[in-house]
Image (cartoon, rainbow, N blue to C red):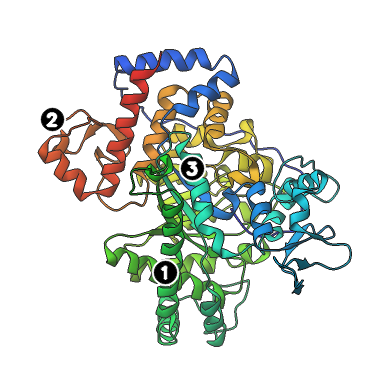
């Protein structure tokens, strides 16, 4: 997740012993001959992490549903962007900043002030270049007194925030190109467009009653409905239109860079990219509600267009922050109301990205449940503290029965929260039948990629080839792409929609009836493409 925090990560406490009875497991469908060949190759490769990584690089992985755009970009790109934007670098704050003046030379050079450096200096000074990479990522980070992985991770985002928004299209190309190189086909990228006008409008309208950290004042449906009317009357839909243009412009830039639609199209063009609208939750309710309403308006307009680029909404910033914690319940009530007005808008929520010691014990008890039951979350991001929730086993059963997926971010949970394999709830989610899929969170900051997460999952949790294949299928099954699923029953990958019952999933030439069905559903089309990729991959395994 993205955001800022100076809070220190406290000593990780011991997880109480938990006994969890796994539900009855459905009989497995026998592996096909091609799957059996892939299983043998996978089992041989897992004897060496390097061999396993090479094998998994080529394995189809479906989609990454939990990726923050600015956090997904590697620091080397940020340095080059800073040079292009003629920015300065402050060793004192370890941050980029815009100069107050430039020289009259051609090209103009930034005037950075005493003790500061021009960003371009990094291209001629290896020590400065290395320092900036370490400042903008987790590379070389070692915890020290008063500075945890949590602190350094979240501090990185403000350090490169001076880079201009004009680079968004280039960043989309970077993440799509990286995905294409790992046989990944779909990305839901979290991004926050310019919402300053909406925030200003929100603060201009008095909150229904004085906001208090101890209650949820001003968050009844009637009160929020009145606020919505005032915000829309104040011109919020004009901001929404500008946001949609901003999203579309970045996608257009990405397409131009990759030459999509031409005979010389880059491989990255095959990676479908959609946006998740990010809401910054670490602010007062006036701003959060205005921005959240803006996000819902953007997505509804996208849905009405018939070709949505923005497919869902999410709340970001550190979940342990003061306002993130004290405003959490009120924010879930906001979502409860807005969901009643915009029922077709998809919601995925960061919830349970917490660990003992980071917040008080009471702070671990309710976030995931409220995200599900009040926030109408269809997917949960992280969900690390699930076993500390009140009636945790009941919550797992509820998530399983309602097919609410958990987005698993193993490296992120390690570097931010200190939660490693023995303390991670992934096995408990799987045992309870909760659908799960692997994602990267902030692959640039963490210096990883999706293959790294697949390798880590296989080695840390003993997952098999078919386990990982199921996760890849789950990622597209729970994407927010429009249309019905290819699969007949939710999270059951053994039978397809009747329209394709005479076809082998992923066949190069589906029947006329199946082809018509696929044309009607963007989600089913991506699922068919994933099955096609598996047919090709498994056929080529030696």
Residue corresponding to mark 1 = 245
Q: Residue 198: where, in percent of width, then height?
A: 51, 78
* Few, some or many residues within 10 Å of mark 1 (<14, 14–19, 20+): few
* Residue occupying the far front of the picture: 106
> Is 232 left, or right, of 204 in this rendering?
left
Q: Compare marks 2 and 3 and give the one earlier in the sequence.
A: 3
Q: Secondary structure at mark 3?
A: helix
Separation of disc 2 and disc 3 at Cα?
35 Å
Foreground residue among 151 and 56: 56
Which mark sits nearer the N-terminus, 1 or 3?
3
What residue does disc 3 label? 177
Label 2, on which residue? 502
Percent of width and height locating residue 321: 67, 61
Q: Relative to 78, is 220 above or below?
A: below
Q: Earlier in the sequence, mark 2 or mark 1?
A: 1
Q: Secondary structure at mark 1?
A: helix
């Amino acid at each position: 997740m993205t955001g800022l925090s100076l809070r220190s990560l406290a000593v990780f406490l011991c997880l109480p012993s938990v006994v969890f009875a796994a539900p009855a497991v459905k009989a497995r469908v026998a592996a096909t001959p091609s799957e059996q060949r892939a299983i043998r190759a996978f089992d041989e490769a897992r004897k060496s992490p390097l061999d396993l990584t090479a094998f998994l690089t080529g394995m189809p992985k479906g989609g990454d549903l939990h990726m923050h755009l600015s956090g997904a970009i590697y620091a080397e790109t940020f340095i080059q962007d800073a040079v292009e934007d003629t920015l300065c670098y402050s060793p004192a704050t370890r941050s980029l900043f815009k100069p107050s003046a430039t020289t009259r030379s051609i090209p103009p050079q930034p005037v950075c002030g005493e003790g500061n450096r021009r960003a371009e200096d990094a291209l001629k000074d290896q020590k400065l270049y290395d320092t900036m990479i370490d400042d903008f990522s987790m590379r070389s980070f070692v915890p020290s007194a008063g500075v945890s992985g949590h602190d350094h991770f979240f501090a990185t985002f403000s350090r490169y925030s001076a880079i201009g928004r004009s680079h968004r299209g280039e960043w989309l190309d970077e993440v799509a190109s990286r995905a294409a190189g790992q046989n990944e086909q779909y990305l839901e990228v979290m991004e926050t467009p310019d919402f300053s006008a909406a925030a200003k409008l929100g603060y201009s309208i008095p909150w229904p009653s004085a906001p208090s950290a101890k209650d949820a004042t001003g968050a009844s449906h009637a009160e929020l409905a009145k606020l919505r009317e005032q915000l829309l009357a104040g011109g919020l839909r004009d901001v929404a239109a500008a946001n949609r243009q901003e999203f579309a412009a970045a996608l257009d830039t990405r397409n131009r860079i990759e030459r999509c639609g031409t005979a010389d199209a880059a491989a990255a063009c095959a990676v479908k990219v959609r946006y998740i609208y990010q809401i910054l939750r670490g602010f007062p309710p006036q701003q959060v509600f205005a921005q959240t309403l803006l996000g819902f308006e953007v997505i509804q307009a996208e849905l009405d267009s018939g070709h949505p680029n923005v497919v869902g909404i999410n709340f970001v910033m550190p979940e342990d922050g003061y306002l993130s914690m004290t405003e959490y319940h009120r924010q879930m009530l906001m979502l409860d109301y807005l969901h009643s007005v915009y029922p077709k808008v998809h919601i995925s929520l960061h919830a349970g990205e917490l660990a003992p010691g980071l917040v008080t014990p009471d702070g671990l008890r309710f976030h995931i449940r409220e995200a599900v039951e009040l926030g109408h979350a269809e997917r949960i991001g992280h969900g690390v503290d699930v076993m500390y929730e009140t009636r945790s086993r009941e919550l797992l059963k509820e998530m399983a029965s309602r097919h609410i997926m958990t987005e698993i971010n193993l490296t992120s949970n390690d570097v931010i929260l200190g939660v490693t394999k023995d303390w991670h709830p992934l096995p408990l989610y799987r045992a309870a039948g909760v659908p799960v899929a692997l994602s990267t969170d902030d692959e640039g900051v963490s210096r990883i990629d999706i293959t790294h997460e697949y390798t880590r999952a296989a080695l840390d949790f003993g997952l098999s080839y078919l386990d990982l294949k199921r996760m890849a299928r789950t990622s597209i099954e729970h994407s927010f792409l429009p249309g019905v699923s290819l699969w007949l029953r939710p999270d059951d990958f053994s039978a397809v929609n009747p329209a394709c019952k005479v076809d082998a999933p992923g066949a190069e030439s589906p029947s006329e009836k199946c082809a018509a069905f696929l044309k009607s559903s963007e989600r089913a089309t991506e699922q068919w493409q994933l099955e096609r990729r598996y047919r090709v991959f498994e056929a080529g395994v030696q």
